[in-house]
Image: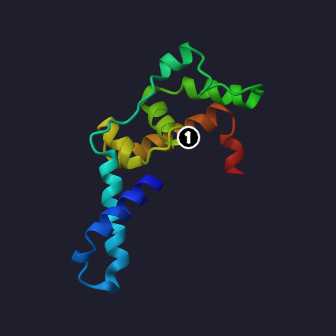
Amino acid sequence: AEDVVQEALLRAWKSYDTLEDEGKAKSWLLTIVRRELARTFEGRGAEVADLDALVAAEAGVLAAADEGDDVRDMREALFRLEDEYREPLVLQVLMGYSTKEIADMMGLQQGAVLTRLFRARARLRRSLGLAAELER
């Protein structure tokens, strides 16, 4: 974020003479920041982790130190999910992608991603025996 802001301020400084209305300086600067942020992600493919390889390697990313029963149960329930539900859930919850980004990566409509996320969470709740508790 700091790099984006620094680059945006540098661009703004260099093109200050193009600012026609000083009353619109805030929106002008935010537009520059937004475009600079987009530039940082251009041509950069999304980093995708191979979940099967991580599980096979028992990567520390997916393991909790001194994990309890709850963490182990959650992990097992997560890996029991079908790929079509597990993938968007992992991308959103663990990797922080937005539903729009997930839709682009998976070649789906954003609504389809939202549906899969909803169903994935519902299946996890049922698998962990939490569905009945939430309905009370």
Q: Residue farthest to the top?
A: 56
Q: Is residue 124 above or below residue 26?
A: above
Residue 74 found in image quarter: top right
Q: Is residue 8 above or below residue 41?
A: below
Frontmost residue, 40 versus 47: 40
Q: Which residue corresponds to the image point at 25% horizontal and 69% vertical from the top-left?
A: 15
Q: Which residue corresponds to the image point at 56% horizontal and 40% vertical from the top-left?
A: 122
Tell how many labels.
1
Q: Which residue corresponds to the image point at 55% horizontal and 18% vertical from the top-left?
A: 55
Amino acid marked by disc 1: Arg
Image location (x, y in percent) of residue 45: 32, 36
Q: Which residue corresponds to the image point at 43% horizontal and 47% vertical from the top-left?
A: 114
Left or right: where 71 falls relative to 43: right
Colour scheme of the picture: rainbow
Q: Residues within 10 Å of mark 1 (few under 14, many from 20)?
A: some
| Element under disc 1 | helix
Image location (x, y in percent) of residue 4: 40, 55
Residue 16 found in image quarter: bottom left
Residue 127 found in image quarter: top right
Instruction: Tell me the residue that label 1 is attached to.
Output: 121
Can residue 1 be seen in this snapshot? no
Q: Residue farthest to the front?
A: 14
Frontmost residue, 7 versus 121: 7
Can residue 123 be seen in this snapshot? yes
Image location (x, y in percent) of residue 12: 32, 68
Image location (x, y in percent) of residue 63: 65, 25
